[in-house]
Image: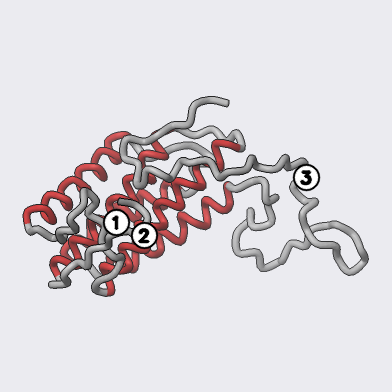
């Protein structure tokens, strides 16, 4: 097995740890995972009102799961953009990039290195503003973890921070299944998580919410 790629923008150091037990061998055909029909057959039912053409794909093919997940992320980014007139155009650009990432596992990577660097620059810019304003509370430890809370828009940004991590996890599962895509897609997903993390801190700062420090009982 080839060495696992670790992004320099990794959102959380534990994100690429192995699950603990190996994935079970999956040998079923794409249509064999459906429940039996009324006549006892294993033929998969396909609704004439199907919302997306890949919803009935085998559970061994996680491309559709990635597409649904990024669709949700893009939709949530649109909600956040509507709540942040100060950075609406910037957030909508991130929103668009997430939507461009959506079909990557099925087609090709269309997000450019320049666009990934642009996202990195926005993350650095947000962090610099928050650091300058002392937005992070003192916790007495090296970790500056805060409780994922705050104003409505700040809390929504925290949700997308987590969704970005889940995006990374799905990508590693896809790679384990032999789906080929560039490492830069993993970089992008980590940066999306980091961007919305700092955006949430920035929004709370602008809205006058004092971050609540979180000191873990488990990690010192």
Disc 2 secondary structure class: helix
Residue 190 image position (x, y, % from top left) = 36, 45
Q: Does residue 29 appear left or right of residue 105 in this picture?
A: right
Q: Residue at x 29, y 53 (%)?
A: 93
- Quarter of the image for the N terminus: give it: top right
Residue carrying label 2: 160
Image position, residue 111 (x, y; %):
37, 40
The residue under the point 46% across, 41% down is 16
> Looking at the picture, how far across and down is residue 95, in whole percent?
34, 56
Q: Secondary structure at mark 3?
A: loop
Lower sequence index among marks 3 and 2:
3
The residue nearer to you, when weighing 168 against 34, is 168
Give the Cα separation between the discs numbered 3 and 1: 39 Å
Q: Which residue ends up furthest to the top in the rendered image?
A: 2
Position above or below: 157 against 209? above
Label count reads 3
Q: How is the image coloured?
A: secondary structure
Relative depth, front residue between 105 and 194: 194
Residue 29's tag is 3
Disc 3 to disc 2: CB gap under 8 Å = no
Q: Return the mark for residue 196.
A: 1
Tell me the mark number nearer the camera, choosing from 3 and 2: 2
Give the CA separation, mark 3 to mark 2: 34 Å
Q: Earlier in the sequence, mark 2 or mark 1?
A: 2
* Left or right for 151, reference 43: left
| Mark 2 in CB contact with mark 1 (< 8 angstroms) | yes
Of label 3 and label 1, which has the lower sequence position?
Answer: 3
Q: Residue at x 40, y 34 (%)?
A: 6
């Amino acid at each position: 097995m080839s060495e696992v790629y670790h992004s320099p923008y990794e959102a959380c150091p534990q994100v690429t740890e192995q699950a603990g037990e190996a994935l079970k061998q999956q040998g079923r055909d794409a249509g064999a995972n459906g429940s039996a029909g009324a006549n006892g057959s294993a033929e998969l039912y396909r609704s004439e009102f199907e919302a997306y053409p890949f919803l009935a794909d085998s559970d061994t093919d996680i491309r559709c799961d990635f597409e649904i997940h990024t669709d949700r992320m893009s939709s949530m980014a649109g909600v956040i953009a509507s709540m942040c007139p100060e950075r609406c155009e910037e957030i909508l650009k991130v929103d668009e990039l997430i939507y461009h990432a959506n079909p990557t596992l099925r087609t090709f990577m269309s997000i450019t290195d320049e666009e990934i660097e642009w996202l990195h620059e926005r993350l650095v810019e947000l962090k610099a503003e928050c650091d300058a304003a002392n937005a992070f509370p003192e916790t007495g430890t090296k970790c500056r973890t805060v409780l994922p809370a705050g104003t409505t828009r700040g809390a929504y940004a925290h949700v997308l921070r987590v969704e970005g991590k889940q995006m990374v996890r799905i990508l590693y599962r896809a790679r384990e299944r032999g789906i080929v895509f560039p490492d830069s897609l993993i970089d992008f997903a980590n940066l999306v998580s980091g961007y919305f993390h700092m955006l949430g801190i920035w929004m709370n700062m602008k809205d006058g919410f004092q971050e609540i420090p979180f000191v873990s009982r488990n990690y010192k």
